[in-house]
């Protein structure tokens, strides 16, 4: 977190610098708020108007802003990504040194790498393994037959119930529950009978799983996240779902059992996917939409109605109920 | 988890076997994936086409498939339920022996049955009781005046805040919070005033409560789940709600305060129920629908619009806003 | 929790009593359920019909019910608020005495006020501070550079990840996660790159945060709740959101990144707010509505369609897909 010169940053991240290479940068900020020792960025053209007034020492931006910038520019083809890389230099990261905290409870039949960090009040069950350099934060639980891959980071209070396998470098935020029973029930003589959930959860390398997100284990076979899947907070992934690599889902989205989502999909906040559907690669679902049938063409899909003043909405809502009748009336006269 | 012969399974579960009774079964699987020492099942006619190609040693199915099955058949009137019973034989269950883990913190004024299992880092408060054979998993919290019934299973990290009474054999998954304050507020001179939540939560026998589900305690009187209610993950049950026996709710559903839901209802994923409504027995609400009025007739109910390509959806959405105007125009000409 | 006379209650809360001042009250209840030593209230005219049959010893109500009340009346201009104040006298509150439980893990570089209560299995990290009279309940985690203000109450199992500042008297329910990483990602050569989340979370005085609610920390700058904001359970607040004072949000609502919500707003259950929008003061959003554009006028706003019998709904839903075509047909003939 020490300061870097602009020349150092340009060198480290292979960017072309326009401006004074000796200028020292000790932090990052927005175009609006960055101070004169900080670095800002311009990625979204919508914010271009803020460039002229920025007090930042420098901006990461594309070459076409050079004429307008009142400060140094680190020229990038992907300013948001390069800014993210530089910002990581200035992120305070609490030390998580190797070793097992005295208050942690590690079963003798668990295997924990010597380079792993096991935090306070962590519980690790029989048959669990924790890989090299992994961090298992305070109050986390690694259940029977769970595997935490190398360099994984369970921030705190993460629960892996049973038969969960995390690949390398998986980041899991607090309150996430992986590997709980899928919701399997059979109605039998007027009562529910629980269907055993014998599968597990497999999470690929470089996935991120948000706070209070839940991923159930499979009934028969596994629930699978391929590599580099990014899940925001409070997402629900039911048993036997498969999510393709590089797909990202925003907060509160929910996917029902055995649905298959392709690669490079973007699932909006609070969107839903019904069970046993397939969504192909490169599909975008807008926020709060419900996917009720399989999707075979890449593109953007939506459901719902627009936000309206409540009185006007009530009038439209009443008409929605009459819509078939109204349509028939119209088509009778003019088919 | 040791192998069983088909004859043993037929005998134990009162099923008629067609095929070699000496064949040994050591696990279960889907029609598609089961190997030649495994048992599969056929309950949904949609999967009947997979029967001819199965490599399973046997299937649990109805009698009408006998002609087509390439393997032994355990004939059942409810194949999914009988399969569930058999599958339970092959479920690995970690041992949870009676006793209190050394790291658990049990208040001297709590009562814990000698046959109960209290896991690592569990906290049990004054006035709490834990019944015979109950399992209270790691990181769980049993608060003041909470009662965990006989043979309950709190998997791990379950929080019972205060005045929560679980019947017998209740299964609660990690992250669930029962008995937190209901959301009661009075506006008073421009500020919110908290309304004390003096009631509790009563959960009937054989209920199941999913991961990260929340059930608030009542304001005056209790929030009640009758017996055999099944709640999936991330469900929100507000104060003073009552849910009838054998009702099941899928993930992310939410029920607002004082609503009453009948028996044998099925509430779809992410569906919502407004406060102070009544839903009669045997009502199905489809996924992401919002119940805005009481329902007095059994049946299936829905709201929302279908998923569409985003461009087409935008055109329909604009027309939804004009719907009353358009309808008036139509009806003026042809009332 | 000892009994009080009606005269005492009238005196303490500055209410005018009609009836016997010596009558002793030992609890509270609804008009329907209160017994003859209990106090009830009548705030919603809808319940006025229950007044004549109440067995309560007294009711808190407005003066206009005096003629109909079969019992004593404590006359109030805001009966619900005054009832809430009185009910608080009868709420059992478990003792939370000052001191640090032996099982808690407090970093030597944390600062905990002598008057604070630190419960069992709590973990407090380096650089954290806990203010006077604060209660940090069992299984809570107060991370690096987090500040718990005076008289805050973290009920149990609350997680403050990093750079979270709680004002005074903030109440946080179990399972809440504050200060986890915002969901910031840049796509870079076919893979997601994580954008560091360098900001924090600032929560004003007298806020309440529900069970399993998540509030992410800001990317650059903070996520902010002004004073007296009230969040129900399972709400998701993304990074850099700002919520104005006295705004209340019902369960399962979700607000996307950088949205700004005004003061005195009411956000209904499971409602959503898209990112980077502004909602002015005194806006009500009905349950499960999606806010897709900024709102500049106070009022009530909605989206969605009404609940219908599924068969009728299917017919309307099909017509929704044809709505633009139908409208054009109509307007062609009668523009």
Image (tube, coloured by chain):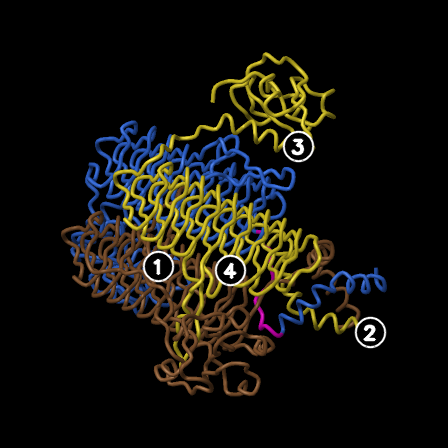
Chain colours: A brown, B blue, C yellow
Mark linked to residue C78: 3
Mark 4 sits on what residue? A270
User: Residue sitting at 51 percent across and 18 percent down?
Assistant: C3
Q: Farthest right residue? A: B333
Mark 2 sits on what residue? C333
- Count the marks: how many? 4
Locate residue B325 relative to residue A160 in the image: left or right: right
Highlighted magenta segment, given as a residue range: B301-311
Mark 1 sits on what residue? B42
Q: Residues within 10 Å of mark 2 (few under 14, many from 20)?
A: few
Q: Residues within 10 Å of mark 4 (few under 14, many from 20)?
A: many
Nearer to us of marks 3 and 4 is: 3
Nearer to us of marks 2 and 3 is: 3
Nearer to us of marks 3 and 1 is: 3
Q: Farthest front residue? A: A22
Per the model, the C-alpha gap separating discs 4 and 1 is: 34 Å
Asked if disc 1 and disc 2 are in contact, CB closer than 8 Å, the reply is no
Residue C107 seen from this side: yes
Q: Whole-percent x and y of residue B325?
A: 78, 63
Q: Is residue B45 above or below residue A83?
A: above
Q: Is residue C229 above or below residue C117?
A: below
Q: Is residue C255 magenta?
A: no
Q: Is residue B250 above or below residue A37?
A: above
Locate residue B50 relative to residue B112 in the image: left or right: right
Camera-nearest residue between B51 and C119: C119
Numbered disc 2: secondary structure = helix
Nearer to us of marks 2 and 4 is: 4
Q: Whole-percent x and y of residue C95?
A: 38, 30
Camera-nearest residue between B263 and A10: A10
């Amino acid at each position: 977190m020490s300061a870097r010169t602009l020349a150092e940053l340009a060198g480290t991240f292979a960017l072309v610098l326009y401006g004074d290479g000796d200028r020292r940068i000790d932090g990052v900020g927005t175009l609006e708020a960055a101070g004169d020792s900080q670095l800002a960025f311009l990625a979204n053209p919508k914010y271009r108007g803020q460039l002229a007034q920025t007090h930042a020492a420098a901006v990461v931006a594309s070459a076409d802003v050079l004429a307008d910038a009142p400060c140094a520019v680190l020229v990038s083809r992907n300013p948001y990504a390069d800014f993210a890389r530089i910002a990581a230099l200035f992120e305070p990261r609490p030390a998580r040194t190797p070793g097992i905290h005295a208050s942690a409870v590690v079963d003798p039949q668990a295997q924990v790498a010597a380079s792993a960090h096991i935090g306070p009040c962590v519980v690790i069950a029989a048959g669990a393994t924790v890989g090299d350099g992994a961090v298992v934060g305070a109050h986390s639980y690694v259940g029977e037959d769970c595997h935490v891959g190398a360099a994984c980071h369970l921030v705190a209070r993460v629960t892996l119930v049973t038969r969960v396998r995390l690949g390398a470098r998986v980041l899991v935020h607090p309150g996430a529950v992986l590997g709980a029973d899928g919701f399997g029930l059979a109605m039998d003589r007027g009562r529910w009978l629980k269907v055993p959930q014998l599968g597990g959860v497999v999470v690929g390398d470089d996935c991120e799983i948000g706070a209070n997100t839940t991923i159930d284990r499979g009934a028969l076979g596994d629930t699978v996240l391929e590599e580099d899947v990014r899940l925001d907070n409070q997402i629900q992934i039911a048993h036997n779902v498969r999510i393709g690599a590089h797909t990202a889902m925003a907060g509160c989205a929910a996917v029902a059992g055995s649905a298959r989502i392709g690669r490079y999909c973007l699932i909006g906040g609070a969107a839903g996917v019904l069970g046993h559907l397939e969504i192909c690669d490169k599909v975008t679902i807008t926020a709060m939409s419900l996917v009720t049938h399989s999707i075979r063409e890449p593109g953007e899909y939506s459901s719902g109605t627009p936000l309206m003043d409540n009185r006007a909405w009530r009038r439209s809502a009443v008409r929605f109920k009459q819509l078939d009748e109204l349509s028939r009336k119209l088509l009778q006269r003019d088919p």
